[in-house]
Image (cartoon, helix red, strand yellow):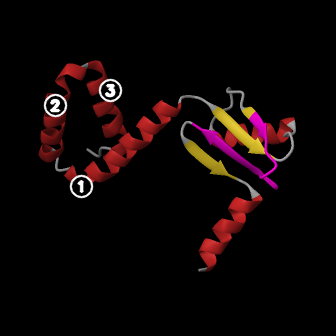
Amino acid sequence: MYYKSKQLALTLLKLIEENPAREEKIIDNFINFCQAKNITQQLPNMVKKMEELARQKAAGDDFIIRVKDELSPENLSKIKELVGAKKVEPKQIIDGETQGGFVAKYRGKVYDGSVRGQIEKLKGELK
């Protein structure tokens, strides 16, 4: 049976959340489980997923979009779909430093669709 890193991370976090007093024992048992199933090679990816999930949880559902000018309803809808926040209304911040495009932040993740971001990305690829 194949175990996905994300599912392992979610399971471990849920177990610890439900039994915080037994955290150390749960982690020991979890490591023993990984060894028994010969999936210890997935632990680094699982830790990355746990960190990502923790950041998302800490960030909450705040959805912020920085733009030069207010977005049209059509563009707003496209950005909401891109970040997976179809039912969440964002806070739009009109920002003079954003020359074009947008920078959105949702659940601890940054989505840079700005002109400046695209230029920086292109510079990195040309090096």
Residue for badge 2: 24
Mark 2 or mark 3, earlier in chain: 3
State how far apart marks 2 and 3 are (Cα): 14 Å
Q: Position of residue 18 (x, y in %)?
A: 29, 19
Residue at image position (69%, 60%) is 117
Q: Earlier in the sequence, mark 2 or mark 1?
A: 2
Residue ranking furthest to the bottom: 127
Q: Position of residue 51 (x, y in %)?
A: 39, 42
Q: Which residue is pictured at 20% across the width and 51% down the height?
A: 40
- Spatial CA distance of label 2 from label 1 is 21 Å
The answer to whether residue 4 of the structure is visible from this angle is no
Is 58 left, or right, of 124 in this rendering? Answer: left
Q: Residue furthest front?
A: 96
Q: Residues within 10 Å of mark 3 (few under 14, many from 20)?
A: few
Image position of 26 (left or right of 107):
left
* Label 1 element class: helix
Report how many numbered discs are placed on residues in the image.
Answer: 3
Label 2 or label 1, whichever lies nearer to me, is 2
Q: Secondary structure at mark 2?
A: helix
Q: Residue at x 12, y 44 (%)?
A: 36
Q: Amino acid at mark 1?
A: Gln
Q: Which disc number belongs to residue 14?
A: 3
Q: Which residues are magenta?
A: 92-106
Give amino acid for label 2: Glu
Label 2: how many Cα within 10 Å (few below 14, some 14–19, many 20+): few
Q: Which residue is mark 1?
A: 41
